[in-house]
């Protein structure tokens, strides 16, 4: 689970309430919440910029922004989410 950040926790719980009814996995909910927080805080939708912002926020234990960017791409390609 990503680090404690009140906004992240609130977004995660709101998504989880809806997603669990649809059978979406918890890991997918985590990735989606991270994507939304990254877009919000970076004020940008470019995946590299969002990944860099999330890396700087230290919301995950990912070793690099590139790793987070791969996670973002998996989220965007997840047919169960979109």
Image: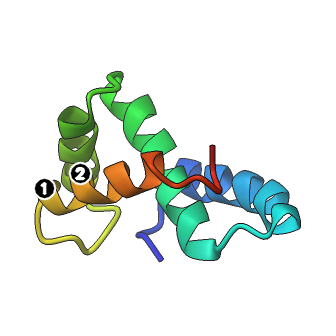
Residue 73: x %, y % from top left: 33, 49
Nearer to us in this view, 16 or 56? 16
Q: Which residue is mark 2?
A: 69
Residue 51: x %, y % from top left: 24, 46
Q: Which residue occupies 83% across, 55% down?
A: 18
Q: Which residue occupies 38% across, 57% down?
A: 74
Query: SS of the residue at dot 1?
Result: helix
Q: Which residue occupies 63% across, 74% down?
A: 26
Nearer to us in this view, 22 or 13? 22
Cα–Cα span, label 2 and label 1 = 5 Å
Q: Which mark is residue 66?
A: 1
* 29 relative to 64 in the view: left or right: right
Nearer to us in this view, 27 or 8? 27
> Is 56 rendered above or below residue 3?
above
Q: Residues within 10 Å of mark 2 (few under 14, many from 20)?
A: many
Q: Which residue occupies 25% across, 57% down?
A: 70
For the C terminus, the image quarter is top right
């Amino acid at each position: 689970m990503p680090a404690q950040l009140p906004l992240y926790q609130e977004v995660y719980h709101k998504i989880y309430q809806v997603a669990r009814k649809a059978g979406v996995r918890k890991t997918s909910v985590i990735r989606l919440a991270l994507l939304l927080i990254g877009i919000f805080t970076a004020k940008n939708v470019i995946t590299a910029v969002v990944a860099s912002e999330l890396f700087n926020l230290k919301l995950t234990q990912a070793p690099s922004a590139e790793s987070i960017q791969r996670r973002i791409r998996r989220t965007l390609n997840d047919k169960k989410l979109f």
